[in-house]
Amino acid sequence: MNNSKPIYVTKPFLPPLEDFIPYLEKIWERRILTNGGPFHEQLEVDLAEFLGVKHLALVSNGTLGLVVAFQTLHIAGEVITTPYSFVATAHSLIWNDLKPVFIDIDPATCNLDPAKIEAAITPQTTAIMPVHCYGTPCDVAAIQRVADVYGLKVVYDAAHAFDVRVKGESVLCHGDLSVMSFHATKVFNTFEGGAIVCPNAKTKQRIDYLKNFGFVDEVTVTAPGINAKMNEFQSALGLLQLKHLASAVEARKKIAQTYLEALRAVPGITCFATAPDVTPNYSYFPILVGPDYPLSRDGLYQKLREQKIFARRYFYPLISNMPMYRGLASAAPANLPVATRIAEQVLCLPIYPDLSAQQVETILELIVARK
């Protein structure tokens, strides 16, 4: 059964190369490679319209987007966040000299549990950074209620949430800022890249200064900014990706439905449900491998690897278990029982547009076989 080619948890979607050639020719002709070129400007406009948001600033990657977001809002002190995410979530706080305060997650969504926020607030707390994990929307209304009572800013790590909607409205419209990633593994990618969704033109202007070293004009620097600009090659790919996005998401949807139908009744395997008012982007397909399954999560992980199927324990280990964070009081495993359990059981199965029906069937046969 061993496959001739490896199957990874995700694979970058790339449109036909011949479709990209005209964009490259334009870049060569214009000799504008970065610093807010024509493709960059067009992509900001097209993405804002596509996503249904008012203002959007492109950045070179999602991590720098988070770093710039906290600079934009002048955040200081402590930020309440989740331990169940990619390390960039917490790293962006450290780069801003902020202290992460971890709270537990909701077992149904893997998102930060709003009911745990209030108990974690101290006089030093200034913000909350939830994550729309796997593209599943956070309970934005509950989070905002707490933020409003205590005067806290809310910055969403929306790395997985490209074009996710609740009741037809973009989930990116919530909070003070939302930061997306356009990394190669994402539903919408620009090789590397990202964007910050902001509520007004004034905030976007500050972001535009900060992502370009703080420059206002040729001789005026208004803040200690950073180089977080998206270049013309990334922007051109983004414009082309938008044209193919619907078919890519539809392919992901079919794979997700096949997985769900085959695995929902398998003892010991838990799949996550999508709320009926949510329009997902099918960015990931996580399962939980529980004690009723004959193999441990790591046993199933290894079984798949032996067949060159590289599923991912995503997110494991928890951010709070990593050396630079585990000394924090909030990082104690006793404080995070749900996140700890899910991190020990989770396995993300391969899902990307080029994954064939036969490959999906092979993956399912290995899981359902239960040996």
Image (cartoon, rainbow, N blue to C red):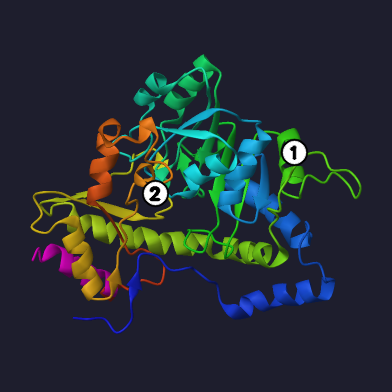
Report crowding for label 2: few under 14, some 14 to 19, many 20 or more residues within 10 A (C-alpha). Answer: many
Give the residue number, with chain letter if any, for mark 1: 206
In front here: 170 or 227?
227
Q: What SS does tag 2 mark?
A: helix
Q: Which residue extends farthest top?
A: 149
Q: Which mark is residue 134?
A: 2
Confirm whether the magenta stretch covers residue 370: yes
Q: Please give the range of residues in magenta.
A: 359-371
In primary-sequence order, the first of circles 1 and 2 is 2
Q: Is residue 284 above or below residue 311?
A: above
Mark 1 residue crowding within 10 angstroms, few (<14) / some (14–19) / many (20+): many
Instruction: Say which amino acid is labelled 1.
Output: Arg
Q: Please say if 323 is above or below 33.
A: above
Work out how far the residue at label 1 is from the one at label 2, CA to CA, in angstroms. Answer: 29 Å
Residue 287: x and y in percent read 25, 52
Q: Residue 221 in the image: x percent, y percent?
A: 84, 43
Residue at disc 1, secondary structure: helix
Residue 272 visible, this angle: no
